[in-house]
Image (cartoon, grey):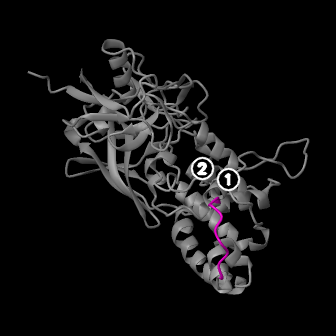
Amino acid sequence: MQSSNTRTVRIFRYDPEKGGEGSFLSYSLDIPDPDTTTILDVLLRIQKEQDPSIAFRFACRVNMCGSCGMVINGREGLACKTNVCDLPAGQDITLRPLNHFPVIKDLVVDMGPFFAKYEDALPFFEPKEKRDEPYVIRPDDQKRVDIGMATDCIACGCCVSSCTMVDNHEGYCGPAALNRAFTLLADERDALFEARLTKALDSCYNCRTEFNCTEVCPKSISGTRAIKYIQRLALKNLKSVKPLPPHPAELAEKKEPAREAQAVDSCACQAHDASRRSFLKGAGGLVGAGIVASLGTVLGVSAVGPTLGDQPSQWVEAGAEKDFPVGGITSVTLHYKRTQAFHSEEKEVPVLVRRDSEQDFICFSSSCPHLGCAVSWDELSRRFKCACHGGAFDRDGKVIAGPPPSPLPRLPWKLENGILKVEVV
């Protein structure tokens, strides 16, 4: 008889020496505590206990380096961030490498193409002026707020793997590179605005606003928002958009055997050669600009504007009152739907609930105020700990060790009919 904690883990295996298309191998593993066991823990146990030949990447183990990106049960994610309890109970756990990347071995992919595309978007900062003193930018400055979490990208490749357009357009930079371009285009200190806008806009044409990249990003960054921001910038700066030479992939497609010259209607030829950029700036520029400006306004307001504004808060059930013992600290995961503009996503947010008496609760965010990594309660030392930098907080959430700049954030709570509810954004 199999234990109720036993799960079947299907792992994609590919041996470069044997070649072929690869295949899945199944492993059976007993997982007694799925709430605190990550997919990375599962892989390490299988590698140690059953098959040492399995290849996969990892480094930090705390959602910071992006090395362990893979497709987990059909959805891109980080193995170190995904807990077994996040996956449907009783189902097989299926692990395969990221899409659109050459597979080196098993779950290890070649990130070279990813970083080559990243370079296409000019991801480096070039200052307009030399300064002896650093710029002073307040955290609440609107220019800083606009880019917000977009600067937290860890280049894990999950967004590129989820994007269906990456496989259809060879010259497409992808959401990660365009998100990086967005953060620099929004920075008035940068000297490469025109060149960067031109490079980025050429790739923005290939986005189909599917929001796949937004859905899977482990840092909750919206690549779609970045792309729409760049398109809106282009509408405001048409004169700054310069013609680009054809991408090498486009040149390869145009190389065809020579054929006899045929009389072709000049209007048809112009229509065939016209790009969206030439339509904006060519003979039909006034018409094109008018159409795109009107559409862009609607698109900018609907897709970009709301994401820059404050999101409404909502009350989410954390569990029955009886599930939280008096004097204890319990970790729970809140499940709810959040809507930004016309995009909805399912959120899973862990919180730490401290119960002091029958009617007194304190709900802490489990996200460290330093770098956003996970905080957990350690019963042995009687403190909250953050593994990535040695951060520690006392039972009240106050900093007692490490670099966190502020105490653990507290979330509003209330009791309704014996149910604890927590307010989230």
Horizontal and vertical percent position of residue 365: 44, 40
View extreme (left): residue:
1
Q: Is residue 239 visible?
A: yes
Q: Is residue 200 part of the magenta span, yes or no?
A: no
Could you tell me residue 64's position as x and y percent?
A: 54, 33
Stretch in magenta: 255-263
First along the sequence among labels 1 and 2: 2
Answer few, some or many: residues within 10 Å of disc 1's Cα (few below 14, many 20 plus, some between 14 and 19).
few
Closer to the eye: label 1 or 2 = 1
Image quadrant where one finds the C terminus: bottom left
Q: Amino acid at mark 1?
A: Pro
Q: Position of residue 330 (x, y in %)?
A: 32, 32
Residue 186 shows up from this direction: no
Secondary structure at numbered mark 2: helix
The residue depicted at 49 percent of the width and 25 percent of the height is 58
Magenta span includes 256: yes
- Residue that badge 2 annotates: 150
Residue type at numbered disc 2:
Ala
Which mark identifies residue 248? 1
Front in this rendered view, residue 218 or 339 = 218
The answer to which of 160 and 78 lies nearer the viewer is 160
Secondary element type, mark 1: helix
